[in-house]
Amino acid sequence: MKGKLILEDGSVFHGELLNNIKATGEVVFNTGMVGYQESLTDPSYCRQILTLTYPMVGNYGIADIFMQSRKSFVNGFIIGELCEHGSNWHYETSLADFLTKQGVPCLYNVDTRAVTRKIRNAGTMKGIIVPEDAAQTEIDELFAVPIKKDVVMEVTTPETYTLESEKEDAPFVVAMDFGVKQNIIKSMHDLGFKITVVPAHTTAEEVLAMNPDGVFLSNGPGDPADVPEIVEEVKKLIGKKPIFGICLGHQLLALAMGAKTYKLKFGHRGTNQPVKDLRTGNVYISSQNHGYAVDEESLKDLPLTVTHINVNDGTVEGMRHNTLPIFSVQYHPEAAPGPDDNMYLFDEFWAMLKKGE
């Protein structure tokens, strides 16, 4: 059936509606050429309408091995051509069937490059997905639905779980799950870490009672300023244990140290973002998915040093404490999807924990 995406500035983009399901959410875009399943199941996209710029999507189907969380948390999916018959040795089901079972509204045969140009020029904004013949009253009602802000509790693990290590000298890490991608946990576990993953509401006292060698602060959705209670718990961990943060975890750590964050015009979402390591001068291609960044100016009077920057716009992509074993990055070293140029950061975390023995 015919459908359309309507942005809050009045822009309309027409296409085909896979399921007669309506949606409201913040419209964002991802420029990656592959990895649609990983993006659909990345909890950091929770409550957003995700637009993919690559012209054909679904050509290799869906497989459980690529799931990054227990389900898809996106509010809607905007794509160009929807491939009906995927082909890949991992193939288990089609993208269309997956979206239907997950209850994800999908608008396809859309000029996604036009949507992307609009968002790049005007910034991310609220949008809705509706049938072509939707009544104005229905459209008004959908735009009146507020976009939920504190979404971390929606995506975090409902219960604590542990992944044991086969290595006798394995560092023990408590991972605070704010919407963690499974490949982050897998990447650390593959290195040999023993990991206990805890829900986002876990207190610093509870974390420290487990006596870990280090604490990991995960990625996740939304504005870090919307979860001040988590920031307060992170504050209590500083100076007590080595800490490594990724994405939202990086931002929460910055707020806990007294820095500020701000919303980017259209965010960084893709698999080809160049990041420069200021310590070595090396440039790495990274996978990214964030709409907020740490304000570099707010770091100047703090015991933090910027270690990585985005080559495209100069924004902060990494920082390290000047005296304590604490560091963080804005981007995703675990990829999924994207390049694995930055897996060395997990090795740095390992080395940091072993040094502290």
Image (cartoon, helix red, strand yellow):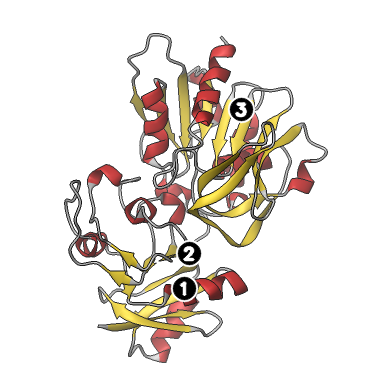
Q: Earlier in the sequence, mark 3 or mark 1?
A: 1
Quadrant location of the N terminus in the rendered image: bottom left
The residue under label 2 is 29
Distance of label 2 from label 3 (alpha carbons)? 35 Å
Residue 47 appears left or right of 65: right
Amino acid, disc 3: Leu
Task: Tell me how far mark 1 sits from mark 2, CA to CA.
Answer: 9 Å
User: Disc 2 on helix, strand or loop?
Assistant: strand
Q: Position of residue 269 (x, y in %)?
A: 50, 56
**Label 2 Cα neighbours within 10 Å, binned few <14 / some 14-19 / many ≥20:** many
Residue at 51% from the left image edge and 84% from the top image edge: 11
Marks 1 and 2, the one that precedes in the sequence: 2
Element carrying mark 3: helix
Q: Foreground: 264 or 347?
A: 347
Residue contact at pointers 1 and 2, CB within 8 angstroms: no
Q: Is residue 225 above or below residue 243?
A: below
Query: Of discs 2 and 3, which sits in the foreground?
Result: 2
Q: Viewed as shown, does residue 178 lie left or right of 15?
A: right
Q: Measured along the vertical axis of the image, is residue 11 above or below residue 323?
A: below
SS at circle 1: helix
Mark 1 sits on what residue? 113
Q: Nearer the viewer, mark 3 or mark 1?
A: 1
Q: Residues within 10 Å of mark 1 (few under 14, many from 20)?
A: some
